[in-house]
Amino acid sequence: MQKTIDPWGSGLVEDYVKLIKDFGLEEFDKAGFPDPNRLMRRHVVFSGRDLGLISMCIKEKKPYYVLSGIMPSAERLHFGNKMVIEQVKYFQEHNAKTYVLVADLEAASTRGITLEEAQKRAKEFHIPAWIALGLNPKKTIFYFQSQNKDVMHLAYKFAKKITLNEFRAIYGQADPSRIFAALTQAGDILYPQLEERMPGIIPVGVDQDPHLRLTRDIVSRSKSEKFFAPSSIYHKFTPSLNGAIKMSKSSPDSCIELPEDLASVKKKIMRAFTGGRATLEEHRRLGAEVEKCMVFELLKQHLVEDDKELDKIYHEYKSGKMTSGEIKQLCYEKMEKFLNNFVKNIEKARKEVDKLRFVKFG
């Protein structure tokens, strides 16, 4: 049994079915959600916690919220960030009250970024990038962690609700900066409920599940507060271009950044691991091993919106009619279009930053 997931580590998930069983997750069922998005339809979203509660809120038009955070330590985004934003967008479009926090305190405590630098990066790049990827800024409430005294007060309260051994059992380790960051995240997750007790959903990669388990444990020990335990929804990792399970920034050729120079992107895609056979003759006869192809996975997760188009690509590649070189070229062309639009939309979004709804704290 897998004992812990490390939200700060580099460990990879190899068996999602086993993960669901080991950590008591529930399988995601797209039938519970109207107009499921690309990630939901294609089983990239695979599990969560208390998803039925959110499904009910959507169907019965009851109040609920979606919350996510920007970690402003990096200078660029990656496709994992894109998946989170697309999930936030889905719930925002289905009447969730939407909160996006800038985790400047966590960046300072765990990544060594000053508060000033974190806030500058958020305003100049991260928030415009989120808007460029579909977040509706007019329907989003933003705040900086370091300015939110309510979150700090909640974190202090919550520190009394968990022991050091319990923290170690969830995270595998317990150094002070990580304890501080995790309790602050619990404060963030429940902050929207200070205004109104209501269900909330947190879309993240499954490596962030420890933060949700910690917060749910805290809620169960704070019954007088009458908080709703947060729901969560998890997506699979975007695999590395070299065939590993997860894209990793420690291996430059494994991961396409957002944005990235097109010449560099083309090289990475052309070197990517595919499902092609050893020779063209063998490929035409046996067809591609599509399930092993990192290029097809990029198309499936990110670059082809239309299900019929993706199905056509799958069958042409699987039959051997489409070669590995052709699927790489197709992927690059779609990636080029996506990145050009992304850069253009960031420039537009930068003009909106001064108009955003940031929570003001006295």
Image (spheres, grey):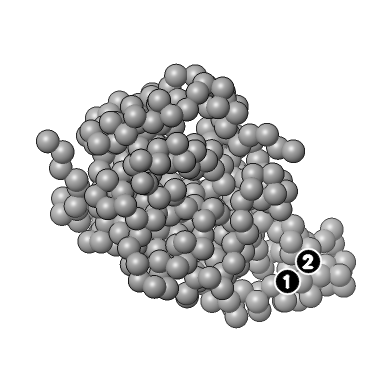
Q: Is residue 325 visible?
A: yes
Crowding at dot 2, Cα within 10 Å, few <14 / some 14-19 / many 20+, comes out as many
- Residue 273 lies, in percent from the top left, at 70, 52
**Residue 218 appears left or right of 144:** right
Residue type of the residue flagged with mark 2: Ala
* Residue of label 2: 288
Proximity of marks 2 and 1: CB atoms separated by less than 8 Å: yes
Q: Is residue 43 left or right of residue 109?
A: right
* Residue identifier under label 1: 317
Upstream in the sequence, badge 2 or badge 1? Answer: 2
Which residue lies most toward the left here? 362
User: Alpha-carbon distance for marks 2 and 1?
Assistant: 6 Å
Residue at the image position 63 percent from the left and 59 percent from the top: 27
Q: Residue at x 27, y 56 (%)?
A: 140
Mark 1 secondary-structure assignment = helix
Q: Tag count in the figure? A: 2
Badge 1 crowding class, 10 Å Cα cut-off, few under 14, some 14 to 19, many 20 or more, is many
Which one is in front, 341 or 19? Answer: 19
Relative to 56, does residue 217 appear above or below in the rendering? above
Q: Quadrant of the N terminus?
A: top right
Q: Amino acid at mark 1?
A: Tyr
Question: At 86% across and 70% down in the image, what residue appears?
Answer: 286
- Residue positioned 29% across, 31% down in the render: 152
Q: Residue furthest front?
A: 224
Secondary structure, mark 2, is loop
Residue 64 in picture, x, y percent from top left:
35, 60
The quarter of the picture where the C terminus appears is top left
Determine the residue located farthest toward the top in the rendered image: 176
Whole-percent x, y for residue 93 in the image: 36, 68
Q: Position of residue 340 (x, y in %)?
A: 40, 61
